[in-house]
Image: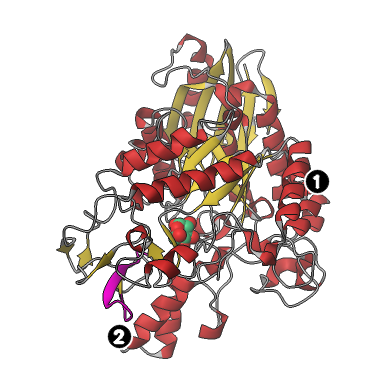
Amino acid sequence: MLRWSLFSILILSALATTAQSGQLDVQPDWWKETVFYQIYMPSFQDSDGNGTSDFAGMTSRLDYLQSLGIKGIWLTPFLKSPKVDNGYDVASYTDIDPVYGDQDDFRNFLNEAHHRGIKVIMDMVVNHTSTDSKWFQESRKSRDNPYRDYYIWRDQPNNWESFFGGGAWELDTLTREYYYHKFDVRMADLNWSNPRVAEEIQQALRFWLDLGLDGFRMDVINFLTTDGILNDNPVKDGGQQHIYDIDQPGVKEAMRSIKATINEYDRRFVVGEIGSDKLDVLRQYQSPDLMDVVFNFNFGSIPDFSVERIFNELQGMEHSMPGYPTLFFGSHDMTRLMDRLAGGDPGRAKALAALILTAKGVPFIYYGEEIGMQNIYAESFEEIVDIQGKTHYKLALKAGKSPAEALAEGNRNNRDKSRSLMQWDDSKYAGFSTVKPWIKVNENFGEVNVHRSLHQRNSILNTYKALINLRNNEKILQYGVYERLEHSDDQILFTRTFQNERITVIINFGDESAIELPGGAEVLMGQPILKTNDFLIFRH
Ligand code: GLC
């Protein structure tokens, strides 16, 4: 109680407080007003009965996204690909993979999204291509092929490792040189010190921008090899330190060429995936000439629930990110929010949703998070689809582990966990498809599905809807700076202000508490008696 009366006093005195940090950012941009929704391409909606999602199926679900209040969609890769890494291994930068449909299906999806006021950004993977791409097929033919320098070839490998496990070099027998692959052996790294590579990528970006696409999510964009492979990485405590293979000199120049190309078009947006969870690394890539925003993994990928840690990251971003941070707790590379942070508790999942949808930043919701979808686990090696999971399983066996231990190791690294099918209803395959799909459905789909959630007043889904609706209608929640950003035991409190109006949000992860509202306050969501995992939003 003491804690709360203290808070109440602070709230009453809020009018006298001045903003501690963060300049008023009044430059209007659509992406600052947007709640994004990430669709993992193969898992959203199948329309043609091949067990994989497609553009026609996704188009049929746009009404759902519109009713949720979504204004931006991030599509994971849909370009032609052998799908070793589910499309992150691109074989052509301008062709749509037939499993997802054709150009007309894509255009129709884009138009229908635009009609509903929804922008669409696509994943662009320019660190590497599939070894099936025409460029690589040419490159490997001879040492003097015009495409040879599109990739990184050496007669001797260095000690760099693949991020999926194992070494990063593969001997190509035809020309007896090694090529470099930071990810799987079938994903060869592009040589960004070759200006022709930068030009080719610029052309690819223009191709999609000309079609009316609203922007990109640039995959592992600080990994580009812009400065060759000069030094071995140092090894410390048995692990390799990624000193020389990422954040190379020249990477910002490459980003500048990408951003300049995007800036040839009006009202486009780019978010960078920087492979790091260190705020100091992330922040240096966010600027008007590099990336509009970057994914804040310092916040988004925290491994366990901790109010203090969440708050510290929020505060750290406020103090050191130039412009807007991004706010998310899930993606296709991470475990699900519901398991990792909410501990299976729908109340806590809602409270975490309230945080990312009202704090300062650009929110990204990962598909299915809005209904509380949970991780899946592989029961055998055959069930693992993800290349990272498979690689770790095989490496564990090679290291002498038993099949059971190797399966545990595979599951630990298996990103299938968060990639299971969108759960629409309780019909077979959860309304995703009529045939056996590419990945299994979570067995909880009978209880956890969109259809059911829509009819439950207090469902996670209806809470997301109400929060997104509030954010869409309140400039303070889009543009407001922090007047206060505080943490006390198990509560996070912030007041955001914009053009002399203010909204306060209190999120309570602790015991029940009563809030004394300032006179004239208008409650926007919640009740002044805050239960555990509850929140209150009011204007004053
Ligand atoms: C990014 C993607 C991940 C992919 C990797 C290689 O981290 O998010 O899914 O495997 O890049 O492209």
Q: In the rendered image, is residue 351 in sight?
A: no
Residue at 66%, 42% (x, y): give it. 211
Name the image quarter holding residue 36: top right
- To which residue does mark 2 refer? 399
Q: Is residue 400 left or right of residue 82?
A: left
| Kind of residue indicated by mark 1 | Asp
- To which residue does mark 1 refer? 63
Disc 2 on helix, strand or loop?
loop
Residue at 24%, 65% (x, y): give it. 160
Q: Is residue 172 magenta?
A: yes
Above or below, 376 against 109 in this view is: below
The C terminus, quarter of image: top right
Above or below, 437 against 285 in this view is: below
Tell me if label 1 and label 2 are in contact, CB under 8 Å: no
Between 273 and 456, the one lying in front of the other is 273
Above or below, 247 against 535 in this view is: below
Q: Position of residue 485 (x, y in %)?
A: 45, 27
Q: Is residue 457 left or right of residue 412?
A: right
Q: How is the image coloured?
A: secondary structure
Dot 1 or dot 2: first in sequence order is: 1
Q: Position of residue 25 (x, y in %)?
A: 49, 19
Residue at 81%, 53% (x, y): give it. 60
Q: Is residue 224 left or right of residue 214?
A: left
| Range drawn in magenta | 171-182
| Kind of residue indicated by mark 2 | Ala
Between 391 and 487, the one lying in front of the other is 391
Disc 1 on helix, strand or loop?
helix
Spatial CA span between label 1 and label 2: 50 Å
Q: In the rendered image, is residue 133 in sight?
A: yes
Name the image quarter holding residue 168: bottom left
Q: Residues within 10 Å of mark 2 (few under 14, many from 20)?
A: few
